[in-house]
Image (cartoon, rainbow, N blue to C red):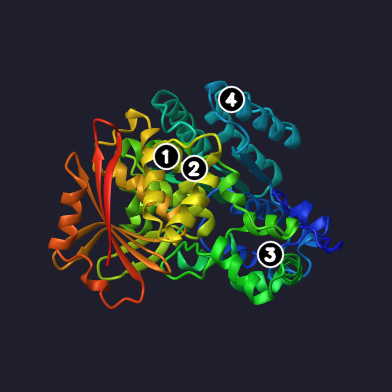
Amino acid sequence: MSQHPLIKYPIGQQSFEVIRSNGYVYVDKTKYIETIINGSQYYFLGRPRRFGKSLFLSTLKCFFEGKRELFKGLYADTMDWDWQDYPVLHLDLNTLKYKSTEELDSLLDMQMGKWEKKYGIDTGQTIHSLRFGELIRLISEKTGKAVVILVDEYDKPLVNNIDNPELFNTFRDTLAALYSNFKSSADYIRLVFLTGVSRFGKLSVFSDLNNIRDISIQNMFAGICGISEEELLENFRIGIKELAEYNGETEAETIAELKRRYDGYHFSKVCPDIYNPFSLLNVFASNEYANYWIASGTPRLLVDQLKRTRMDLTRLMSVEAGESGLSGLDVDNIRPVALLYQAGYLTIKGYDRKYTLFRLGMPNAEVEEGFLQYLLPYYAYLHNEGSVVFISEFRREMSEGRVDDFMCRLQSLFSDTSYEMKMEEERNVQNVLFILFRLIGMNVDVEYRTSEGRIDILVRTDRYVYIMELKYDHSAEEALSQIERKEYTLPWSVDTRETIAIGINYSTARHTIDSWLARHL
C-alpha cells in the first residue's frame, strides 16, 4: 500500500515557515507562546536531540516577525497580539562539530556580519562579546523595538567537547562572554530563549542571570516538545490507519506498538506520556517500524562515561536522582545518570514527594534495544555474522530450555572478549549477561533478593524460570550447591513454569565460563 498522497511528514524539517507554507503535518504547539510572552524575559529549555527544540524556536521567530498568515488555524491566531515585526536575532549553534576554536569564531563572525548587513549597522567591534552587545543596543535603537534573541543548542560546543578539557574551557570562556550581554543589555531585550541539552552550572548565562527561567522540568511546559497521545490521535489518524493496513494489524494493535516502541518520555513531575516525534514521523512516512531516533546519533560519549565510572548497567532500568541531577551538568564531575537523562536515554518514571527524588528508567523499546545493542560490543565481542543472528539463536535456545546450547554460546562469547574488559570484575560479567537477556526480551533481575540471600541472575520466560549463581575461580558444583543450600528456588515452587537452577564458574585465567551444571526442578 502506498502512502496517502496528501500527507506530507516533515522529517528533519526544522523551519516553521517551510512546514506551514508547504502543507506538512504540524502539531500545534503555539499555545505555549502565550505563556512565554506573558512570563519571564529569559528562558531556557533543555530537551534531547531531535525532539523539536529547533522547530519551536523557528515558530517563535515567525511569531515575533509578525508572520500571522503562517498561524492561521492555530492557537496563536486567537491570541490578543499586535503582530508587529520585532527584530529577531536567531543564533543556531547546531550546525558544526566544534573540533577547533576556529569553527565557533567563524560561525559567530558570519552570523553577526549578516545582522549588521540586514540592519545597516557597523559596530566597529571585532571581539565577539563586544560586537554582540553593540548589535543588540544599536538594532533596538534603530528599530525602536526591543530585540528578541533565540539561541538554538546554546551548549553544542560544550557538549561536543566534554572529553576535551582544553577546548571545553576555551569554548566556555567565549560563550560566557557572549551570553553575558543578556544581562548587561536587558533594557534592549524583549525576550531571550535558549535551547540545549544541559544547563552547565559554571556558565555565566546561568550564574549571572538569576532570573532566567529554566522550564525544562516544569509541569506547564512538559509537552512543549514531542507528541502526546492526544496529539498523536488528533493529527495522525490517516498515518495510523495506513500503518495498520500495511503491517496487517488492527488500529488498536498499531497504537499499542507505537506506544511500546516510541512513547514513555516524561519531562516533569506531572507529565503525559510523550512520544519521540522523530521516530513517529519516520514510521508514518515509511510504514515500517524501526529504531529511527537511536540510529540517528551515536551515544559514544555516554558509553565512554559508563565505562569510566564502571557503572552497574542494571541500575539504568531504575535509578533515582534529585532535581539538580536532572537539570544541570558539572563538567568537573559528570554524573552518567544526569548525562543519560538529558540525552534522552533515561526519562522520569515517577516522583517521590517525601524525599524529593525522581525515579528514572529507559523510556521505551526503541531506546532500550538500540542503546543496549550499541553497548554490547563494548563489553563483549561478536563475530562478523553480527549480533542479530547471535541474539536470535540465543533467544530460541533459552525459550526452549536448551541449557547446554545457550551456555555454550555464552562460553564462546566470553572467550572472544578482549582481556581489556577486565572480566575478572564480577560487575562486567553481570553487565554482559544483563544486556544479552534484556536484548532477547527476557525478564531479568540481577542480585535478586530472597529471604536467604541474593540470586546472582534470575531470568523468567513463558515456560522457564532460570536461577543462576555465578562463581569466580571456584566450581560449578559449588555454585549449584549454594542455590540448593539457600533454597533460592523456593519462591517458584508452585509456579507453573519449570524451574532450572544453573551453577556457573567463570575462569579469570581463561577469560571465559569454564563449567556449568544445571538441575531441572
Q: What residue did someone put label 2 on?
A: 374
Q: What residue did someone put label 1 on?
A: 303
The C terminus: image quadrant: bottom left
Name the secondary structure under disc 3. loop
Q: Is residue 269 visible?
A: yes
Q: What residue did someone put label 3 on?
A: 27
Q: Is residue 230 above or below residue 260?
A: below
Q: What residue did someone put label 4 on?
A: 103
- Tag 2 or tag 3, which sits nearer the N-term? 3
Name the secondary structure under disc 4. helix
- Tag 4 or tag 2, which sits nearer the N-term? 4
Q: Is residue 44 visible?
A: no
The disc labelled 4 sits on which kind of residue? Glu
Mark toward the viewer: 4 or 1: 1
Whether the residues at callouts 2 and 1 have beta carbons within 8 Å, the answer is: yes
Q: Residues within 10 Å of mark 2 (few under 14, many from 20)?
A: some
- Tag 4 or tag 3, which sits nearer the N-term? 3
Name the secondary structure under disc 1. helix
Mark toward the viewer: 2 or 4: 2
